[in-house]
Image (cartoon, rainbow, N blue to C red):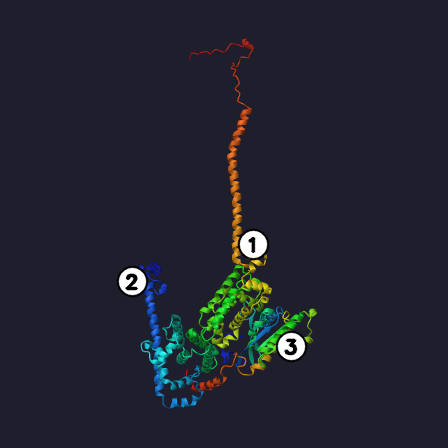
Amino acid sequence: MSQRTERRGIHVDQSDLLCKKGCGYYGNAAWQGLCSKCWREEYQRVRQKQIQDDWALAEKLQREEEAAYASSHGAQTQSHTQSTAPQTHPGHTSLGPFSKFEEKKTNEKTRKVTTVKKFFSPSSRTAPKKETQEVRTTSPSLSRHASFETDQVSKDFVDFLKNLQKPGREIHKQCRAFIVNMSGKKDLGADELSECVQDFYQSMADRLMSHYKGSSESVEQVMDQVEKYIMTRLYKSVFCPETTDDEKKDLATQKRIRALHWVTIQMLCVSMDEEIPEVSENVVKAITDIIEMDSKRVPRDKLGCITRCSKHIFSAIRITKNEPASADDFLPALIYIVLKANPPRLQSNIQYITRFCNPSRLMTGEDGYYFTNLCCAAAFIEKLDAQSLNLSPEEFERYMSGQASPRINSSDADWPGAGQTPDVVATNPVLAQLNHNLELLSSLNSRQETVMEAAQSLQADLLSWPQAVKREVQEILEKYPLQILPRTVSAIDANNMDNENLPPPLTPQVFAG
Amino acid sequence: MGENLPRVPGGARLRCDTLGRPVQTLRVKMVLLGGSGVGKSTLAQRFVKDEFRMTTPTVGCAYLTRVVHLSNVSLRFEIWDTAGQEKYHSVTPLYYRGAHAALLVYDISKRETFIRAQVWLKELEKHYIEGSTVVWLVGNKGDLEEDRQVSVQEGQGLANDRGLFFIETSALSGDQVSNLLIDVAHRVYECTGAQQGGLSEWQEAPLGDLHHRDTSSLMTSCCKVGP
């Protein structure tokens, strides 16, 4: 009995393996027992519902706010307007204090409410009013149906704020309003945009600080979320904006790095030995990280990529030198990595981080340190000249113009063919590996040849041996020909002389029995 | 001390003294400048090594932190090592932007490093803002007394001329290193810590100062969110 139950515990019924929806396909525990097709449908449904819920919540918030607003519209708003009017800069984006936001709304109530509401309500797509359309045309990134990523971030943000309850709503409202406001400021220069965002961070942080009564841990948490949400939303419009020459600089840097492809690890005096597999692994990881930076939207995530890249470089140096790396080792290594990686839109990314990252993170702390190093590396590459690589100006010119390549020329200036191998080995680990394999192959080849020779000689030996034996036998046969001697037959006692003296042989006697 | 303690406004952290009163921890950015091979990184490592509890083991010693406790405040030093090679000279201003303290290190047994230090100093003075950065001239490798090429008087003289603080240390033996750190801590706190917010954060340009003042006063009046 007990045995049976035990067995049942382990036993999996055929029906357990099938999709829970009963479609006849097999299910999977990772998809909550559904088959891939049903799971996809189910997942889509849940996600849609979640998004709709969020919209609904946002709309509800908006309605609540309107109601509260209408009820207190009388004396309060009037006094508000009066007290705060002098500080209003209609063109200024900083929505700092909530009171200001409300006051501002008094001025442009109708416009704002419709705009914001349009935003919140899912039906906004069907009934565009004049104002909304204006906003929409100025900011495609906002009006366009949000991409998966922004969707996800908005959802996370709402989830996060739900835990904060009432202040969460306020934060949400402010952020939305800020984004709407920013969408109208696309024509501003990058510095002004940066200022708007920084002002917003500042006022938000101040507010949170007073709300949490000094617990900057929670403030930082909220600020991180706010930064994530806002910058994901604004990314398209403020990253490498048309008003700046960021793009031009990007292209220039990229071209420059490409022109410097010939720079070797030795010229930069980098203490990393890429022939050690662990080191080259770290180098590859560092390159991947720095390239990945461009794919992130949030400044803090970008900083994270830089930090990870730097950590890999430190590991690589540590493995090579067997001691912790100092800045003297680190900066050249980072420059080398940047040259190798040629990270996409390097200048734009640096500018973007400088403009829109939460400043407390940028100028101090570990992330700040690595970011500063990256800025240094970029600046160094821009200014890089013959002297910084310990080359003569003529050499540098020749390499830059592509007339010569240091990998071939350094060992033998005139004859690239001569002495090429050791140099190539020294400069490129892959080539070194290749060379090594070639050597191995050639040694194998020669060994095989000796084996073949030996085998052939053995064969020859084998062939010649029976002949030699034959010949030898022949020779011996010739030397000692077979002689048949005449045969003499004689009786045993033929030579006996005294036969006559012998007694007569015994005759058998018969005894009668 | 206190990597995960709660913080007070402006990025500072809370520590409690014996009576349970909170003590602020302020962030201090300290940059190490000086030619290659004068012992900057050894000095930085020495700063950190003296601490009771080692900070998280790092693979590199280019960025290190160390908390120094003064009587009424704690300072969290963020020590930035810089590349000393001459070819990187042109990019180093990026490092000392916003630094509260700068240590100008030279090797007393190598005259050229002392001359290099003066070059660094000139560069530093271009970006130097009165009262915001405390600059210290540090003659390192004090243990190499027999090879001395730069006398104490010379070092002290340069420091006096330029209004710097001066000390000779030995990163190898640890001589004077902790004294230096304590001195720097006191000086930094006196110079910048007293002005509220001077230490906790730094911005390249003051962003709309007037505007901020307005908002902060308003904020308290309308702050009806939260419990």
Amino acid type, label 3 = Phe
Of labels 2 and 3, the one closer to you: 3
Residue of label 2 = A23
Amino acid type, label 2 = Cys
Q: Earlier in the sequence, mark 2 or mark 1?
A: 2
Residue of label 3 = B166
Q: Visible in this render: residue A270? A: no
Give the residue displayed 33% in from the left and 74% down from the top: A52
Q: Quadrant of residue A125?
A: bottom left
Which of the chains bears the disc numbered 3? B
Dots 2, 3 in contact, CB < 8 A: no
Of labels 2 and 1, the one closer to you: 1
Q: Visible in this render: residue B117? A: yes
Which of the chains bears the disc numbered 2? A
For label 2, count other residues whose C-alpha is less than 10 Å away and answer few (under 14), some (14-19) or many (20+).
few
Q: CA distance from mark 2 to mark 1?
A: 69 Å
Q: Secondary structure at mark 1?
A: loop
Dots 2, 1 in contact, CB < 8 A: no
Q: Position of residue A297 (x, y in %)?
A: 44, 71
